[in-house]
Image (tube, rainbow, N blue to C red):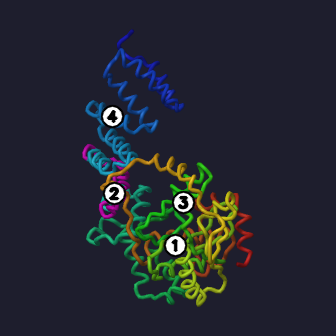
Amino acid sequence: MDKFINSYQIQEILNLINQKKFDDAINKIEKLSIELPNNKILNKLLASTYFNKMDWHNSIKYHEKILFDEKDKYKIFTNIGYAYFKLGKINQSIDAYENSIKDNSNFELAYNNLAIAYIEIGQYEKAYDVLSKIIKLNKNNYFAQKNLIYLLNFINPKKNNEEDNFLLEINSKIKYLTNNLNLNDLYKVSNLKKIFLNSEKEIKKYYKDLIFEETQIYRKNKTDLNCKRHFQVFNKFNIIPKFCFSCYKVQINLNNVLDLIKLYFLFDYISLENNNIRKCLVELRKNVNGNYKGYIYCRELAEAKKIEEQLNNLIKQEFKNYKIEIKHGCTEFYKSFPKFNNINMHGKQDIEYDEKWAEKENIIDNLEPLRSDLDKKVLIESVKGINLADILIIKNWLVYASIIGDESYKKIYPNELHKTFLNDILLDQLSFRKNNQKQTI
C-alpha cells in the first residue's frame, strides 16, 4: 500500500464526518493508522471526528497530539478548551483559552469562550474584563455585546475603564436617569417617557441600532432553579421532576405594556425575605394565554401565599386591571398532568411525586460530568436599579405591544418602532395574541 494518504481517502472520511457517520469515519482512519502510525493528517482527522462526535476525552487526546505540529496553535487550544468545558473542567478550559489568546491575541472566539468559562464559575469581573477586550477588537461582536450587557445586571465595574468601554458608559448614564426617583415617581407616564427617550439618546451616541434579543427581565438571587435540566427530564420521559413539586410561583397577569413596565420597577424595588427570583416578560409560547406577565418563584406553598398577599397589597394601589394567582410548577406540565394545575391551599395536593421516577431523573443527571468544587457553577445576585439590559428588553416589549395592537406604548414612546426578531416569532400566533389583548383580565 502507498505510504501516503491520497485525496480520495481523505475526502471519503470527510464525507462521513459531514454525514455524521462518526464511527464509520473513525474505523476508516484507524485502519489507515495501522499502515501509517502517528500520521499527522490521520491524527488531525481523528481530533476533528471525536470533536464532532462530542467524545470530549478522545477529542482532547488527539488535539494534544497534533498541537505542536500545527502552525495555528490557537485554534487547537480553543478546541481543547471547549472540550474541557463540556467535561465540566472549567479551570482547565480557562487555561486552554488563555494559551489560545497567547498564540493569537486577536482571536475573538477564544475570548468569547474564556468569558463564558469565567461566568460559569462566578468570576464575573474577570469575564467583564475579557469581554471588554473583545469590544476593543471589534465593537460589533454581537456575542461580546450581549454577554457584557448581561453582566451589567450583576456587577458595577470600576469606572476607570469607562473610556475604553462605551457600553459601561451607556449603562452608567441610564442608571443615573432614575437616581432621584422613588417608586411612585417611576409609575408616572411623564417620567417613564423621559427615561426611555433619554436612554435611547445615550445609546444612539454609540450605536445606530443596538440589538439585544431578550424578552425577560430577571432579578436573581444565588439559587439555581436548574429549569433546563428539569425540562430535559420532562421532555425525555414525560415525568415531572421531584424539584418541581415544591416549586410554586406567584403569577401576575397584566393587560398592557405600561403596567408591565411599572411591575418591573416594583419587582426591582420590592423587599422579600428570601430575595426570591422574579421576572417580568412578554409571552412568546404558542397557545399560552396572557401577553404580559410577572413571576415570583417560591420554594413552598406557604411562602407563595405570603408573597401573594404582600404583592397584592402593593399592586392594587396602582394597577387597575390585573390578576394575581399562585401556580404550581410550569404550564408545560399541565397537558400531561392536569391535576398538577390544581392547588390545594390547605392540605395534600392532588398529585404527588412518584419515587419510581427517580431512576429516570438519574439517567439525565448521569449525562452531566461530575465537577470539582473549584469547577462548580456559581451564581451571584442581581444588582438593583435600571440598567442597559433592562432598557433594551423594555424596548423589545414596546415592539411586542405595537405588533399585537396594544397602543399604550405610544404614551411613553412616540418614535417609530422598526421590525425586529419578534415579528418573526409572533408571525404564526399573531391572531391569538391580538385576541388575548382584546380580552380583559
Q: Gap in Å between the C-alphas at discs 1 and 4?
A: 45 Å
Where residue 298 is drawn, which disc sits there?
A: 1
Mark closest to the chain's N terminus, 1 or 4: 4
Q: Which residue is mark 3?
A: 242
Q: Residue at x 50, y 83 (%)?
A: 194
Mark closest to the chain's N terminus, 3 or 2: 2
Examine the image and state in which quarter residue 247 appears. Answer: bottom right
Which element type, helix, strand or loop, lies under badge 1?
strand
Marks 2/4 in contact by CB < 8 Å: the verdict is no
Q: Residue at x 70, y 67 (%)?
A: 433
Q: Which residue is mark 2?
A: 118
- Name the one closer to the observer, 183 or 315: 315
Crowding at label 2, few (<14), some or many (≥20) Cα neighbours within 10 Å? many
Q: Gap in Å between the C-alphas at discs 3 and 1?
A: 15 Å
Which element type, helix, strand or loop, lies under badge 4?
helix
Mark closest to the chain's N terminus, 3 or 1: 3
Q: Residue at x 47, y 50 (%)?
A: 365
